[in-house]
Amino acid sequence: MSLITWLRKEIEEKFNRQGDAGIIIWYDPGGTLATLVNNALPKDVDLLRFEGSYLTMRFKLESNDPSFKKRWLLYIPEKPPDESWLRDIELLGERMEMDLLELLRKRCNFPITQKLVRLLRNNPENAKELADKWGSLIGEKQVTEASLIDAMLALSFGLDCWNMDEALLLYLSQRNWKERLNKRGLWEEWCECIREWTGWLDIPEDENTLRERLQAMVLLSELVTVVPELANRWTIVPSEPKRSVAANLARKWRQREPLSDAYMHAARSVEQAYELSSVLTVSEPLLSAETFYIIDELWKHELRRAIAKNGSNFGKKAERLREIAQSRQRLFWARHDRELGCFWEAISLSASLFIRCRKAVQAADGVGTVQEFIRCYTAEGGWWQLDSWALRLATVCEHLSGEDKERFLHPAWTAYGQYLQYVNRVFADAVERDGWQPTQMNFWQAFRRNRGHKVVFFVDALRYDLAKHLREILAGRMGFEITPVQTMLPSITELGMTALLPDAEKGIEVTVQRNKLSVLVSGRTMNTRAERIEWLKKHLPQGGMVVRLDELERVDLSGVRTLVVLSREVDEFGTFAADLQPQGLLELTERVARAVRYVAEKGFQHIWVVADHGFLFVPPGMQLDTLSAPEGFICKRRFVVGASAKGCLVLEAKAIGLQGDVILAFPKGTSIFGLPGEPSAFLHGGLSLQECVVACLHAKVLAPVQKVKVTMSVPDPVTSRTVSVTIRAQPTTLFDQPRRVKIKIGKQESKPIEVAPDQSQQISLTWLEFDEEPPLKVCISLQDADTGEVLEEKEVSVEIIV
């Protein structure tokens, strides 16, 4: 039964003894039941609340009912005074002294102990909060001293109901709990809970000592469950079943993202205090153990012992290396320590790349035709994956020392270079036998056939593996069909982008004018970006628009039915960006994914993503075979126009789908023409699977994605270096989808969180380092984590006492 029901019965019984009219003067010291009074009031009873003056209360009563013909409840959240203006009214009616503890005594036949007097009567805030949240904290439980203490502890720890594990996690992760619990009179009760949970007879009086001892017990218990022979080494580790209980708490602690920083700090401290570096040795059970950072260090040391400094025995142990790295890569410390995570990812990628490159080279001997090569490259889990791994490996390898690169990465780069050279050489032989039939110029016909709101992204150098990565990023929102496309030769921006334009299917002509390649469609040159944009605008239907990727979110798309988005298009062939880095390509793919989500939300029904060409990524340390540059009209690293050369594939324009009478030559494999200057690590223009096989991505959006509207509440002024922002989701329709958002304060960004309709959450972000000078004002913005759209932005004052 609820407190309100009990309270109402108490009031009704007293009124029933007074007849149709009556007065109850109710004293509730500390106002422990103040929030329940209105709901507990019986029908036909008027309420007067004490507002600081007994005389004023009497005056109100007599003014409203001079003859006392009604029923009145006078609620006074204080102890009865010795003398009072209400004394004669008490004699006229009935005086009731009832706080929460007295109500429980009467209705539950419940003994009042000195402990409960101290906790509920001497600390009335405990009683007020308990009464307010009685339903969730007590509910149908039997009311006992223990259940009441548990409920008060739950309130102290901010829990909806009592859970010892949850309270322990907070206690292990945060400081100053003794001070907080002492304010409620609950420190001794908490210590008793710890005694019972741990089985310890003595509890350290110093709070920090107690916390450190608990942290050690919990973390070492988990370690001992993995390495049982250590059980007798530390007396702090309990026997079963408490050991398993403590180990389970360690796992919960580690999995609780908001508490991960506290977990890492505690684990490092315990690791040092108990000298685990000299205690532990590498063993198979430790392969999946993640309690302490030192375990990863031990495995790293073991790998360095196993592999020669020059990597000469890498191949013999690659499978085991991959197994170890993939296991460690998924665990806690690798996920939370970037340098460690990159180390394990690099080893995993390096071993995988080495193994698969060797297999691909062997498999290539059994491949005969151009189409068979393309199928091997584009199949699910095909050779494109090797390019993906190499690109990712290049983004993480900088976190390895020079010695580790030589030991663990050099063999993989060597294997990848051999794969690129051999497979593309035999691929060129297949092209020499079968010819080359580009399919790129068929795109605009397919694009034109689809009705409705549609958009196409022209993305420079979106290689096949990057297109697969893009599809994977967007998989949770929309399903893209991916179709392999054979690009134009040479694989340069001028030709590739032109092939994607309207009327390209009618034929693309190439000529040489003043030692420059000229590309024409229907007699119009398409050499520059401006010329191609002008051609697009001329052929787009009414309601068409051409925009750059970086301006997409700033233009008004209302009324636009056909949209073309140009991304990072470069007009000079030979290399598409002199300062290109592997990380930059992955970031470009992320930006395209964000833009795709954006146009889907704007109501576009068909979305295409196409590329002009791919590229070769030359791995570190690979020496490219250099051919003498022939005397032709145009000579670039990966092709020559107007000449033939030894060791090259020589083709006439008409044999590769072009109009014109020029001759083109392409070095086979990964060879290049020797030209002045250092060759880039990124090459295109030639003939290889990586340069000439790209993807066409197409998705049909059945309905616009309507995300929930999200707002934020921010403190003003900001008074702390760590700011807590409240996020609220307010649905506008029944079909609103959750939205992933993040907070940006100054230059710092929070991790994304997902908020569902009618949900609120808090994001805490440390935006200013301890030694940084606070600005006078700071901008706080709420952003869509997927599209980057700014949902709300506020500039607030900063008032931090330095």
Image (cartoon, rainbow, N blue to C red):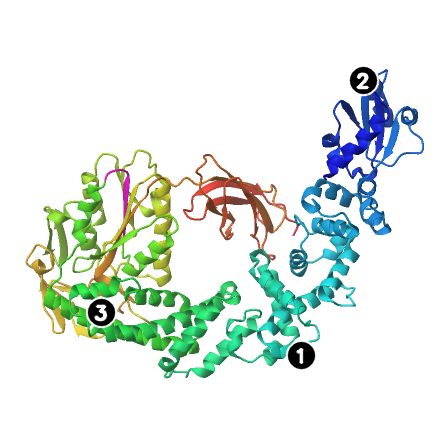
First along the sequence among labels 2 and 1: 2
Classify residue 490 as left or right of residue 201: left
Residue designated by label 1: 233
Mark seen at residue 676: 3
Identify the residue at horizontal 81%, vertical 35% (top origin). 77
Q: Is residue 139 magenta?
A: no
Identify the residue at horizontal 18%, vertical 53% (top origin). 440
Question: Disc 3 and disc 2: Cα gap in Å?
Answer: 103 Å
Magenta residues (range): 451-459
Of the residues tagged 3 and 1, which is closer to the observer? 1
Label 1 CA crowd tier, 10 Å (few <14, some 14–19, many 20+)? few
| Residue 132: x %, y % from top left | 71, 40
Q: Quadrant of residue 3?
A: top right
Q: Quadrant of residue 389?
A: bottom left
Number of numbered discs on residues: 3
Q: Amino acid at mark 3?
A: Pro
Position of residue 108 relative to residue 637, above or below, is above
Q: Amino acid at mark 2?
A: Asn
Classify residue 43 as left or right of residue 428: right
Q: Amino acid at mark 1?
A: Arg
Does residue 9 appear in the picture of this structure?
yes
Does residue 688 appear in the picture of this structure?
no
Residue designated by label 2: 64
